Image (cartoon, helix red, strand yellow):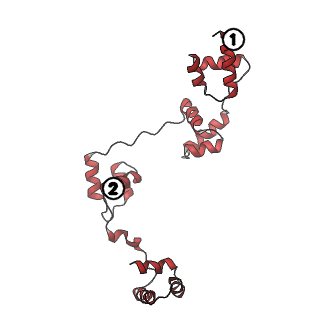
Amino acid sequence: MDRVKRNAEIVALVKARKMPRCKIAARYRLSVSRISEIATKHGVHVRVPDPKKVWVASELINCGMPLTHVAQRVGFNIQTLRHILEEEGLYVRSLPTPLWTEEEVRVLRRDYGKPGLSVRIIAAKLGRTPNQVMLKARLLGLKWPLEFRANLGREPALTERQQAEARRRLAAGESARSIARNFGVTPGTVGRLRRQ
């Protein structure tokens, strides 16, 4: 293929913006910078990201905003934004979660569900996030004891006497809605009494 025809095809592909420059470069066995050079020489300028938008994106990421939200905010495709920020050294991909050691699993089994030890405290002790601790505990089949889980210390909506009366009225055929209206609770609360 002669050089003029090849350059015309390259310029047409860059102008159409349907194929990434790296694929165009691979097709013609050229470097990406050479593709950009050819396109610029023929009057097609490769779009350079706005430096202000890149700066705003880096500030938002430093504030802790997720990359997907940042991409929407500044108007970039997420892959493009990640690539730009990685090139600038402003974004580093998070490393995969390290495997759990036998010692960590032993500590988790010992401490999970103990009174006075929250998931946050256990996570800090292990150097992990609370989500990682809860996920591993679920995989190990660990659960908090019932006395710590039941209603999380809330008072029941109905007293024992009201619950007994509600059950009696449900058995007599009265609707859960009318009973709930009478006690000032939701119909779901009364419906749960029927299932217990």
Q: Which quadrant would the N terminus be assigned to in this image?
A: top right
Where in the figure is residue 186, as x and y percent of width and height? 52, 79
Q: Position of residue 193 (x, y in %)?
A: 42, 80
**Distance of label 2 from label 1 (alpha carbons):** 65 Å
Q: Give the amino acid type for the residue marked by disc 1 in the picture.
A: Val
> How far from the left and from the top, in percent, is residue 195?
41, 77
Question: 10 Å neighbourhood of mark 1: few (<14), some, or many (≥20)?
Answer: few
Q: Answer few, some or many: residues within 10 Å of disc 2's Cα (few below 14, many 20 plus, some between 14 and 19).
A: some
The residue that mark 2 highlights is 137
Which image quadrant for residue 148?
A: bottom left
Residue wearing tag 1: 4
In-image side of 135 versus 47 (left or right): left
Q: Is residue 157 above or below residue 94?
A: below
Q: Is residue 173 left or right of residue 11?
A: left
Q: Tag 2: residue type?
A: Ala
Residue at the outermost top position: 2
- Identify the residue at image location x=63%, y=40%: 56
Q: Is residue 104 left or right of residue 174?
A: left
Q: Up-down: is 33 above or below 170?
A: above
Residue at horizontal 28 percent and vertical 50 percent from the top: 105
Under circle 1, the secondary element is: helix
* Marks 2 and 1 close (CB-CB < 8 Å): no
Along the line of sight, which residue is nearer the eye, 116 or 44? 44
The residue under the point 33% across, 54% down is 139
**Quadrant, the C terminus:** bottom left
Secondary structure under the numbered disc 2 in the rendered image: helix
Picture quadrant of residue 32: top right
Q: Which mark is residue 158?
A: none
Relative to 143, does residue 159 appear above or below in the rendering? Answer: below
Whole-percent x, y for residue 185 in the image: 51, 81
Q: Residue at x 74, y 20 (%)?
A: 43
